[in-house]
Image (cartoon, rainbow, N blue to C red):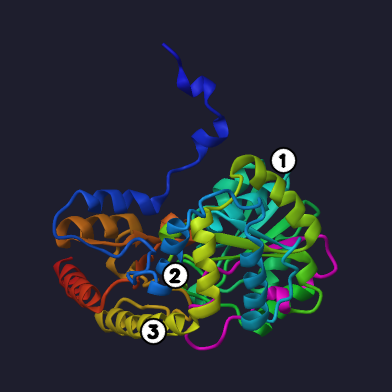
Amino acid sequence: MIDYNSVLSEKIINVKPSGIRKFFDIASEMEDVISLGVGEPDFKTPWSIRKAGIDTLEKGKTWYSSNSGLMELRVEISKYLERRFRLSYSPSDQIIVTVGGSEAIDICIRSFIEPGDEVIIPEPCFVCYEPIVSLSGGKPVKIPTTAENHFRVTAQELRACVTDKTKLLILPYPNNPTGAVMRREHLQELADILKDTNIMVLSDEIYAELTYNEPHISIAELDGMQERTIVINGFSKAYAMTGWRLGYAAGPAPVIQQMLKIHQYSIMCAPTTSQYAAVTALKNCDEEIKHMVDEYNTRRRLLVDGFNKMGLECFEPEGAFYVFPSIKKTGLTSEEFCEKLLYSERVAVIPGTAFGKSGEGFVRISYSYSLNHLMEALKRIERFLKSI
């Protein structure tokens, strides 16, 4: 018999499965579960977007697009980035359309990283960064962020991590799982450190539209930073288009050109139907975004207030659609808390450790669910806390 451990890549064997999927899979096999684990909007994709997709299918527009994506879509992405974030990119050679933001992250990291290169990653953070860096032969260098600093990276922390092997900084704001944001003054402090180096920035801005106190600021907007930043964004979160699998990257032409090679050989192009639908999203759906953000804001306030009243100190998120309450006072680890809550009260949330070691003592709860689900979940969690 074949010894698969001897033929499989040691790199992939050493990669841990996603901690998010573990609890999602358990919950999917149980009855009467309120699952608050997956970051997926409960809103339907706006009708005008769905109709645009249907129209393209009816007209038989089901062929490959160019590798970079439909020019019509890249033009609209360029207009959108200028309109919303004051970023100027050429549709012809500075934008690539990808299969979700996740592919954009993957091909960006792989375009930069060679064995031994260091990549600075603030934690807690989205689960894919570290595995992709490791699979690329790079070394993840983690910056643990804290609630006391509003889960932001400080200039002092960044400076302490930079070495002559540092190739890339991943900047995941607005942040999943904490909901933290970086304001202009915080970004400027980081930019002052980076602008005289050869360190590049991967700015994951998939939640850029979902902010509640101030508009999102991209580090690429700051003086001297656009030339060293790859902006990653997409349609899943803001437009409730998760299943359409569409994202994009915008950055310096020499970098996008190399990212395109990986995209060409591994993917070919993003789904054409999704691309046509995304043109409509960018042209016509600003009001739908505003409506969804208003709804998320109501849910955000409900959960933050609810957890603080229970005695679980809860950082107030300023972006994305997650809360990250501390469960340290229970004496349970994040994993223990989530398992006991799931089996005793049928509420599924994600341990903070799924997003890095610095997430210990926290759990992530998505509020991309209805108010009725959230209110019932709060009742069950409060009952659980009293029982322990």
Could you say which disc has been placed on residue 384 in the image? none
Picture coordinates of residue 335 (x, y %)? 33, 55
Residue 202 image-quadrant placement = bottom right
Find numbered disc 3 in the image and state the secondary structure of the residue it sits on: helix
316, above or below 236, in the image: below
127, above or below 302, in the image: above
- Give the residue at x 39% y 69%: 45
Label 2 or label 1, whichever comes before in sequence order: 2
Tell which of 276 and 381 is nearer to you.
Answer: 276
The magenta region covers 193-221
Q: Is residue 103 magenta?
A: no
Q: Which residue is mark 3?
A: 297
Which SS type dominates the magenta stretch? Answer: loop
Picture coordinates of residue 325 (x, y %)? 36, 72
Whether residue 223 sits left or right of residue 218 in the image: it is right
Residue 159 image-quadrant placement = bottom right
Comparing labels 3 and 1, the label whose residue is closer to the camera: 3
Find numbered disc 1 in the image and state the secondary structure of the residue it sits on: loop
Residue 255 image-quadrant placement = bottom right
Callout 2: few (<14), some (14-19), or many (20+) C-alpha neighbours within 10 Å? many
In the current view of this chain or complex, which residue is farthest to the bottom?
A: 213
Q: Which residue is mark 1?
A: 115
- Give the residue at x 30% y 83%: 302
Q: Amino acid at mark 3?
A: Asn
Which image quadrant: the C terminus?
bottom left
